[in-house]
Image (cartoon, rainbow, N blue to C red):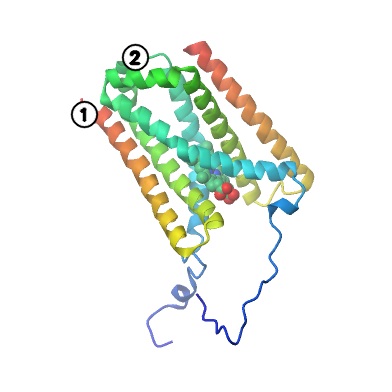
């Protein structure tokens, strides 16, 4: 910390910059928050991947038991959500990579990208699960 | 100025994190890598649906798949650690809690990475 002499500089409440709640929610803003939420959800969910890999390495009895949990309606629900989080975060991340080049930052274009991200993530998730049910 | 530091080394890494643009860059590098790797991971899972244990181990243990899976783990783990670091820095303000969270974040990433890697390697080499 910088050295501040409290006598020379009395600490008083200073104005703070306004935070999220003062702004009217916008679609692009919600999508930005959603990128963070999906990133955090994917983070925690890596434990599921670890569990599945460990189960496969452990042997058939344990693997079948874990697969049973993943295959239950609740397991499928969680995995469906995880798929959506992954697809949404992946497309949202690609949006960020486009922005990093300095392009597509205009309001209308950013709004278009945000809509495409949401629609794309839902579409890809459904596609994955339709193929999944067709295969397995 | 009486030292052997070059002018360049004197001005690098002076941001609050003392690490220059590495964080940003590695987040982007792993983001790009994650795209094909996550797609590979999901396609693998779909192709394994309904398979028995022996088939799954056989697939995950084959050299090419195993190497790609290790790449998935490596890239994702680095990426998520950097990402969570930003989230922590945004919301956890006290110096001590912040450092504790950042440590836990690193421990978590290492845990996920190494446990997954050992499981994968066991399926390749463990017979
Ligand atoms: C599938 C391909 C992926 C892409 C293209 C991608 C891309 C990105 C990008 C560009 C950022 C930075 C966003 C920013 O600067 O605000 C980011 C943040 C993040 N990513 Fe990913 N990511 C991917 C997969 C993952 C996975 C699998 C995880 C976790 C297991 C993850 C976790 C995170 C987290 C926690 C953040 C921080 C979010 C924030 O600061 O708001 N990402 N991702």
Q: Quadrant of residue B2?
A: bottom left
Q: Secondary structure at mark 1?
A: loop
Q: Residues within 10 Å of mark 1 (few under 14, many from 20)?
A: few
Visible residue check, residue A40: yes
Is ligand 1 within 8 Å of the beta carbon of the residue shown at mark 2? Answer: no
Q: Residue at x 44, y 54 (%)?
A: B101
Q: Is mark 1 within 8 Å of ligand 1?
A: no
Disc 2: which residue: B52
Going 42% across and 31% down the picture, which residue do you hit? A48
| Rendered location of residue B18, percent (x, y) | 47, 66
Q: Which mark is residue A129?
A: none
Residue linked to disc 1 = B126
Instruction: Give the letter of the chain under mark 2.
Output: B
Q: Are marks 1 and 2 in contact (CB under 8 Å)?
A: no
| Secondary-structure class at tag 2 | loop
- Pick whichever, A68 or B68, lies toward us: A68
- Residue B32 in view of the camera: no
């Amino acid at each position: 910390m910088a050295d501040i002499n409290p006598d020379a500089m009395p600490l008083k409440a200073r104005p703070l910059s306004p935070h999220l709640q003062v702004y009217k929610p916008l679609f692009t803003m919600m999508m930005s928050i959603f990128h963070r939420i999906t990133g955090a959800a994917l983070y925690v969910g890596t434990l599921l991947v670890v569990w599945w890999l460990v189960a496969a390495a452990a042997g058939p009895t344990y693997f079948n038991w874990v697969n049973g949990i993943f295959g239950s309606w609740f397991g499928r629900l969680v995995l469906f959500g995880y798929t959506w989080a992954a697809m949404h975060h992946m497309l949202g991340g690609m949006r960020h990579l486009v922005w990093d080049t300095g392009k597509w930052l205009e309001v209308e274009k950013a709004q278009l990208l945000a809509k495409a991200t949401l629609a794309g993530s839902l579409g890809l998730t459904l596609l994955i699960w339709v193929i999944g049910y067709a295969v397995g | 100025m009486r030292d052997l530091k070059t002018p360049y080394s004197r001005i690098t890494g002076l941001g609050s994190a003392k690490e220059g643009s590495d964080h940003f860059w590695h987040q982007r590098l792993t983001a790009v890598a994650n795209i094909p790797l996550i797609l590979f991971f999901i396609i693998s899972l779909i192709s394994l649906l309904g398979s028995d244990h022996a088939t799954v181990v056989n697939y995950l243990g084959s050299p090419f798949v195993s190497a790609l899976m290790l790449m998935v783990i490596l890239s994702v783990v680095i990426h998520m650690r950097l990402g969570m670091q930003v989230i922590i820095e945004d919301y956890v303000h006290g110096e001590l809690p912040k450092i504790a969270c950042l440590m836990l974040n690193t421990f978590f990433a290492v845990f996920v990475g190494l446990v997954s890697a050992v499981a994968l390697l066991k399926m390749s080499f463990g017979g």
